[in-house]
Image (cartoon, helix red, strand yellow):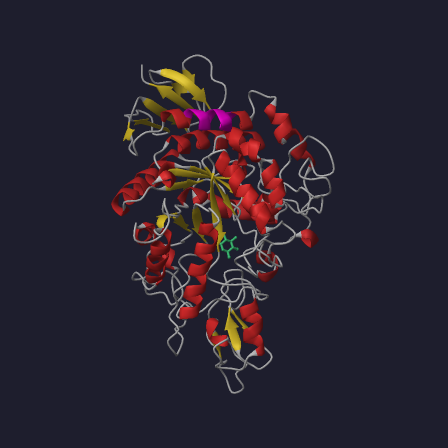
Amino acid sequence: MDWWRQAVVYQIYPRSFADSDGDGVGDLRGVISRIPYLAALGIDAVWLSPFYPSALADGGYDVDDYRDVDPQLGTLADFDEMTAGLHARRIRVIVDIVPNHTSNRHPWFREALAAPKGSPARNRYIFRDGLGPDGAQPPSDWVSLFGGPAWARVPDGQWYLHLFAAEQPDLNWENREVRDDFTTTLRFWSDRGVDGFRVDVAHGLAKNLVEPLEPQAGMKDPIDGALPPGTHPLWDRDAVHDIYAEWRQVFNEYDPPRAGVAEAWVHPSRRPKYASPDGLGQAFNFDLLEANWNAGEFLRIITDNLSDAQRQGSSTTWVLSNHDGVRHATRYGLPPEEYRSRDNARKWLLSGGTSPRLERGPGLRRARAALLLVLALPGSAYLYQGEELGLHEVPDIPFELVQDPAHARSRGAEKGRDGCRVPLPWTPGGPSFGFGPGAAHLPQPAWFGPLSVEAQDRDPASTLVLYRQALSWRHKLQTAESMDWMPSTNGQVLHFARPGGWRCVTNFGPGPVPLPNGTVILTSVPVEGNQLPADTTAWLLSS
Ligand code: GLC
């Protein structure tokens, strides 16, 4: 029943995974063609980022129709074939559900634009009159996460709320019709055999819409814990859990119950509610996305999240990379600074990858060590496509080819997230390194060739082979969700034991340390003798 608790989930960004028809955009038949690859990797589930009809104002997170496949990506029949093919290889399927906003091409939004003020069609969204004598000022000071005001004006003078791009109008979750439509969608995919849902912006649905709208200026982000819980007008309000309680009932209509994982950027003390068995069941822990390569930071994050998960009755999730951030091989190859590695990486991106200097080799070495560390921990691990190839972020996409709305909306203050969404290299050459028969929708750098699947397949020291070995060992060794820290005399070394004699030791320091006793079964880079080199993880079995 609880297959998800310690599952390894591989995130597919469908438009950049594999392209079967040469139009430059990945598709579901591309995924089908790579099922043997996914099976050989040894994952337990895939999570597909949105494949729904979309104009791609936000990489597919602007959904035109929640119950269909984008014609460029395939058909519902392809989806069914993909699901059956994955299930036949014992790989579960998680789909992304985007409830905070539709796209501006969704039939409901078109209807709302055509309908008068105060109409039921407008009430599915958040329309308000503006402020000032002629209503020319937005209804509140709320800002879009992609930059600029969160309100856009329509021809009759009203404004609608969009916490992301203007093409992503926010839904009104106080409206029963909206709620019912989403449970219809959950059943639609569950009936097709989908095993779970990743819930986009899960902390955003319930808003304080009482007039006058509460100002946001000067208000802290709810994530830093400075606000009394649940008091922000837009984020992480308690009422959101009523929605997930309803969803849980839908999930539990199925056998096994459908799983849920919340993307909730909330204070850790607020995560348990999202992850509760009466709610979505699991919530992402994004702490490692923001952490530096540092033993102390990892220690704190691991300890805190394991104890949080225990309190909430869920399992924690480990995420090193996803489609929204700079790949971790790159983060770990940038100079450590006082600020968080994510911010460091953003600056590097804006410089086109020139400053500060990226140390590609050490970055990848640490990424491999980090992987073995997180795969040895209790809980589930979410891998992002391409990390198994040791890909670095692509920093030099020409500005005129950037697709991510965060770039334009922030007026260039952000480069955007395209650098981790560049189509995967499958072969050392060809028009798109084997991504498809044609070109790729984002330019791929020349250094993708030697990192392609085909090139790494043959190389026993490759990152791809390391992932396969690690996942295969993990399957054999994974037991109860517990771990014990082992004494370590060196603050740069983390060493822990899982039940059954499985041990993991990571050396974050600059020089070698003695390997603890035990039989070494896997190391993140080749290790000789009984010293564990810098930036290396070893898995051992107690002898
Ligand atoms: C989530 C997604 C991100 C998207 C945003 C708006 O944070 O992960 O890619 O831009 O939601 O839907």
Figure quadrant of residue 44: top left
Queried whether the magenta region covers residue 470, the answer comes back as: yes
The region drawn magenta spans 466-473
Q: Is residue 483 visible?
A: yes
Task: Pick the residue in front: 176 or 508.
Answer: 176
Q: Is residue 105 above or below residue 292?
A: below
Percent position of residue 21, x then y: 70, 44
Percent position of residue 364, x then y: 53, 31
Q: Is residue 36 above or below residue 414?
A: above
Task: Pick the residue in front: 306 or 49.
Answer: 49
Q: Residue furthest top?
A: 529
Queried whether the magenta region covers residue 176, the answer comes back as: no
Q: Residue furthest bottom?
A: 133
**In what quadrant of the picture does the C terminus appear?**
top left
Task: Pick the residue in front: 378 or 289.
Answer: 378
Percent position of residue 483, x then y: 29, 31
Q: Residue at x 52, y 58 (%)?
A: 66
Q: Is residue 285 above or below residue 149?
A: above
Q: In the rendered view, does 419 fall on the left or right side of 10?
A: right
Q: Main secondary structure of the magenta part?
A: helix
Q: Is residue 422 visible?
A: no
Figure quadrant of residue 232: bottom left
Percent position of residue 18, x then y: 63, 40
Q: Residue furthest left?
A: 311
